[in-house]
């Protein structure tokens, strides 16, 4: 995907974005309610420095490993033992975040 040689990943991501945009538009336009009859409310998410830094670190790790974080366990289970290092790094990063969470910008 990052070599721009195949469209399939971009196609999946682009189609998901399009479906999301159309779905939200229709939910708002038709004023569709939940199954319990409650109004669906949309509150904008605040973009802050911590989100940008976290997204950058997440994307950097994804780009360096060449694998989506989800299938790391399957890749490790299929015999690619190098992915054990990546799983360990992801878990270590999670614990480091938990330790410094109160000091990080949110």
Image (cartoon, helix red, strand yellow):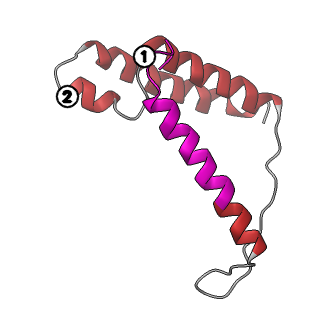
Q: Residues within 10 Å of mark 2 (few under 14, many from 20)?
A: few
Q: Earlier in the sequence, mark 1 or mark 2?
A: 1
Asked which secondary structure carries label 1, the reply is loop
Q: Residues within 10 Å of mark 1 (few under 14, many from 20)?
A: few
Q: Quadrant of residue 22?
A: bottom right
The residue lying toward the viewer, choosing from 106 and 53, is: 53
Q: Which residues are magenta?
A: 1-22
Circles 1 and 2 in contact, beta carbons < 8 Å: no
Q: Is residue 103 visible?
A: no
Horizontal and vertical percent position of residue 57 = 62, 20
Q: Is residue 59 left or right of residue 83?
A: right
Asked which secondary structure carries label 2, the reply is helix
Q: Is residue 11 left or right of residue 56?
A: left
Residue at the extreme left? 79
Q: Main secondary structure of the magenta part?
A: helix
Horizontal and vertical percent position of residue 4 = 51, 16
Q: Quadrant of the C terminus?
A: top right
Q: Is residue 18 left or right of residue 28?
A: left
Horizontal and vertical percent position of residue 98 = 59, 33
The residue lying toward the viewer, choosing from 33 and 11, is: 11
Residue underneath mark 2: 77
Q: Residue 66, which numbered label?
A: 1
């Amino acid at each position: 995907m990052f070599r721009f040689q195949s469209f399939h990943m971009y196609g999946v991501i682009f189609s998901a974005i399009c479906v999301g945009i159309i779905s939200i538009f229709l939910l708002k336009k038709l004023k569709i309610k939940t199954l319990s009859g409650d109004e669906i409310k949309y509150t904008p998410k605040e973009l802050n420095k911590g989100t940008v830094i976290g997204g950058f670190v997440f994307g950097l790790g994804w780009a360096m490993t060449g694998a989506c974080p989800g299938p790391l366990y399957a890749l490790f289970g299929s015999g690619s033992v190098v992915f054990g290092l990546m799983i360990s790094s992801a878990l270590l990063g999670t614990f480091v975040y938990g330790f410094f969470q109160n000091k990080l910008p949110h």
